[in-house]
Amino acid sequence: MAGILIPPSHRMHTDRLRLLRLLHLASPALPIGAFHFSQGLEYAVEAGWVRNEAGALAWIGGVARNAIGTLDLPVLLRLHRACRSGDDASLQRWSRFLLASRETEELRAEDRHMGSALARILRELGSSEQRAEPGYAEMFAIASVRWNIPENEALQAYAWTWAENQVLAAVKLVPLGQSAGQRILHSLIPLLEELATQALDIGDEDVGACALVQGLASARHESQYTRLFRS
């Protein structure tokens, strides 16, 4: 029996819809509270570890390479696949793994806060059911699968969202001009694409983060005297 042919116009409509859903999920206007958190960057600026545009790029790029690319993205990939296959046990296991891998209470609080906020939004949109203490990456994966966003595009969008929030934090904290922020984002794009691609080949035993200075900065930020960002 011949396969069913999908009209090109239908495929184009589906692709456009998927793109718009992806932009919605990655939008800084999505009210999940990501702008409340600096992930240790605020302390790094306070301590003088990040002083200028070059320092901000080096800091964000370093965290991307040693934490986001080796922990968040490989776990998001597994969450996406678990959700797509209906494997709720694996979905919960990898979500718990990611939360347990957060080095400080501040980072764990961020994960819980953003996960709960995204879960609430998705329930209001009819795209998810009630979940107990969901993590952010877990809900990002669920939204991606429900909205037919492929895993590679989901990884790129997650990486972009993280980088954009870090750059916005740097613009406020260093401080930097808006043009400097855009130059940093432009410089990060090839790295984000590289990390999203590499995540596809990271085995279970190699999933993890090695960003010791970020962990130290996040821990010290919890007791920093003056703060713009939540702890």
Image (cartoon, rainbow, N blue to C red):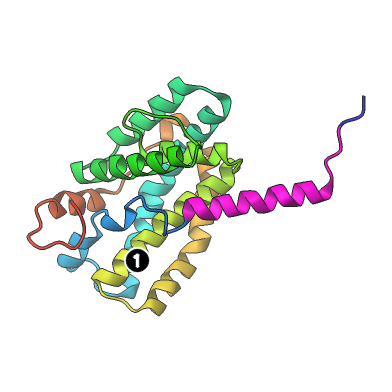
**Local SS, label 1:** helix
Q: Name the residue under label 1.
A: 168
Seen in the picture, residue 33 relative to 50 is either above or below; the reply is above
Q: Which residue is drawn at 36% across and 47% down?
A: 67
Q: Does the magenta stretch include residue 53?
A: no
- The reply, left or right, for residue 191 in relation to residue 118 is right
- Residue at image position (46%, 49%) is 158
Instruction: Estimate the x, y position of residue 35 in percent, counting from the top left.
Output: 31, 58
| Magenta stretch encompasses residue 25 | yes
Is 205 above or below relative to 152? above
In this rendering, position of residue 144 left or right of residue 62:
right
Pick whichever, 160 or 116, lies toward us.
116
Query: Does the rendering let one see residue 38?
Result: no
Categorize mark 1 by other alpha carbons within 10 Å: few (<14), some (14-19), many (20+). some
Q: For residue 52, which quarter of the picture? A: bottom left
Query: Taking 85 as reference, is 51 left or right?
Result: left
Q: In this view, does 179 lie above or below 169?
A: below
Q: Residue furthest left?
A: 225
Residue 193 position in % (x across, y down): 54, 55
x and y, in percent, of residue 92 in the image = 40, 26
How many marks overall?
1
Q: Which residue is drawn at 52% across and 51% down?
A: 156
Is residue 152 shown above or below 20?
A: above
Magenta residue span: 4-26
Whole-percent x, y for residue 23 in the image: 54, 55
In the picture, the quarter occupied by the N terminus is: top right
* Amino acid type shown at disc 1: Leu
- Residue 11 visible in the snapshot: yes
Q: Residue at x 55, y 51 (%)?
A: 22
Per the picture, the main secondary structure of the magenta-coloured stretch is helix
